Amino acid sequence: MKMKTMKKLSIFAMLLLFMAACNSNSEQKKSMENSKDLASNPFMHASTLPFQAPDFTKIKDSDFAPAFEEGFKEELAEIEKIANNPEPPTFENTLVAMEKSGELLRRVNGVFNMLSGANTNPVLQNLSEDIAPKMAALQDAIFLNNELYERVKTIYQKKDELKLDKESLRLLDYIHTEFIRAGADLSAENKTKLKKLNEEEAGLSAKFTNQLLAAAKAGALVVDNKEALKGLSEGAINSAAQDAENDGEKGKWELSLQNTTQQPALQSLENRDTRQKLFEASWNRAEKGDQNDTRATIVRLAEIRADKANLLGFPNYATWSLQDQMAKTPEAVISFLNKLIPAATAKARKEAADLQTVINKEKGGFQLEPWDWNYYAEKVRQSRYDLDEDQTKPYFEFFNVLENGVFYAANQLYGLTFKLRTDIPVYQEDMRVYTVYDNDSTELGLYYCDYYKRDNKSGGAWMSNVVEQSKLLGTKPVIYNVFNFTKPAPGEPALISYDDVTTMFHEFGHALHGFFADQTYPSLSGTNVARDFVELPSQFNEHWAIEPQVFRHYAVNYKTGEPMPQELVDKLKKSLKFNQGYALTEVLAAADLDMEWHTIPAGETIKSADDFETAALKRTHLDLPQVPPRYRSTYFLHIWGNGYQAGYYAYLWSEMLDDDAYNWFKENGGMTRANGQRFRERILSRGNTEDYNTMFYNFRGSKPDIKAMLENRGLLDN
Ligand SMILES: [Zn+2]
């Protein structure tokens, strides 16, 4: 839900990167200039700080480019050596050697990702622009290395004779599959075709992103009458005036567009005409027939993906793409979505009827439309729960939630303890660093927390590793969580919302998945798992935020130390199930569109993106007029620009898993150390060493059941 997936650089991607660098003359020249600095470059050796933590007292912006360059060079040389080894291929001299390779690149990339997400600057931004296209271009060059693939294939064909341990066998399977998925088995002619399709896809994907950015900017709603904005806060109106002025519309007000269909201001705008205009500005942003119209771009993207799948021997893109996921097939995804659709849409219809009742009571004289939904839902929410965020915030002080909530839950379930450290250098003074101790007091890893919003930080919240756990490499996890909470005035407490509290539990759930990693090979370690499995540990951990034992422990008034009154706790709990029919239906509609676009067969021409979308939603009964998809096809950045194609369902799939896993706890005595240990042993410590379905089955004792998710969303209530 809230994780920003930081793409980790596999050894293959690293290799590709290196080759691109080598093929470029200017890169070689730069390398000469930089070579004299390498001796003092902090990335050239493993950090001597505890857990190989990056030494931010020594790292300078100018160290990254030469370290990347040298890292590519080393990695390429290593891979070439493996591919051209005169010895016959063995698991050790091929697979293990590949896992060990790229040490320098791993090091510099780990720190680079950390900083470019959370504390960037023009130097790092330029560098990442430099690196990104090389990575994309190199992807093919790596997986289409014939000599390397022949070695992997030879070992794979003898896998039953090799007496490999379970994890090694999984690694062999995994890497072999990745080669095949990338087209290693294709003829030379088809490899060339595939490369061309990949290039065209990458180009169109970048074009889509740029078109959408421009479309969203141009699509902002400008109003010339302050009265039309009635209902917005004074602060929101002022910033709308400022935005208009910045765009040369002084004296007017501008409401800029967010990437979802629904816009935040729709909750407060009293003027129905303004609401409709803002909604339509959002809905039609990329369908205006100008150069920012994305319809031709997405149609071509869908066609290219179908052609790629066809070339690789699959009936459609989703079938190819889902092979290494827990769901495995589009049929499994569609069947999963179909189990949710009736309950979600029934609930949404009921919610719509409730909202219509309010409209009628007020003698509104109109039918509920999508632009009315959030405005009336907010009215119902306030009257039904009488819950104001300002009432609850004094009970959620950030550090208290972290240490007495998030850490406390990890202590109760897994026996972990935490010690604040002041000797580990950080890249920003507001951060905190903790050593994490296991239940037997051995050191498990290092945890960084970077919590306040800054101009040089990406939005949202995320977790990643700067050092990954691996027995082969002898490394323990160094993990960070990044948030965007508002920094309080000096001396004031950082008070957050309950939504923020769940975000903290969520990101720490990812962190636990990383800390409990117990793998030999870095490629299979910790959170390096399928997209439809990776949100299980994080969403599972959210459940403990509202667990009475945990909640009581952290939800205390920052001034008085008093626990939150029960009446307020009850209101908060009830409000969590509000509007879930709408919330689930809009996500289902988006997930459905994603699957529809990525199950078209090769050779099918789509005449109209709009007709395709309308027909798709109608076929799956997700065409509720008041509940449009969370993202319309033409501005669905996840699937056309961000790599989530045929994968948007993963959030909901993981939700089925986490709710069902939590139900196992409820059925077996709840929050106990023994139960936590079981979850750790069977899920959290496993990385990608086992089939995901087997892993889940071994924990739950049955296949995932969707009922828990429906219950938790309040969709089975009358
Ligand atoms: Zn997440």
Image (tube, helix red, strand yellow):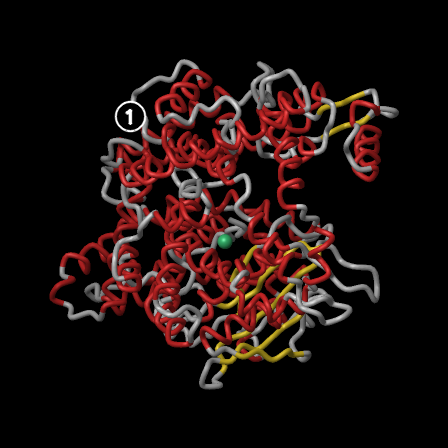
Element on which disc 1 rests: loop
Q: In the current view of this chain or complex, which residue is farthest to the bottom? A: 441
The structure residue drawn at horizontal position 54% and vertical position 66%, both measured from the top left corner, is 548
Q: In the current view of this chain or complex, which residue is farthest to the left? A: 161
Residue 700 versus residue 611: which sits nearer the camera? 700
The structure residue drawn at horizontal position 58% and vertical position 46%, both measured from the top left corner, is 130
Residue 475 quadrant: bottom left
Classify the position of the C terminus by image quarter: top left
Q: Position of residue 307 (x, y in %)?
A: 31, 28
Q: Is residue 215 visible?
A: no
Residue 685 versus residue 64: which sits nearer the camera? 685
The answer to whether 82 appears left or right of 31 in the picture is left
Q: Position of residue 460 (x, y in %)?
A: 61, 50
Instruction: From the image, tell me which residue sits under label 1.
Output: 601
Q: Position of residue 231 (x, y in %)?
A: 77, 32
Residue 354 versus residue 229: which sits nearer the camera? 354
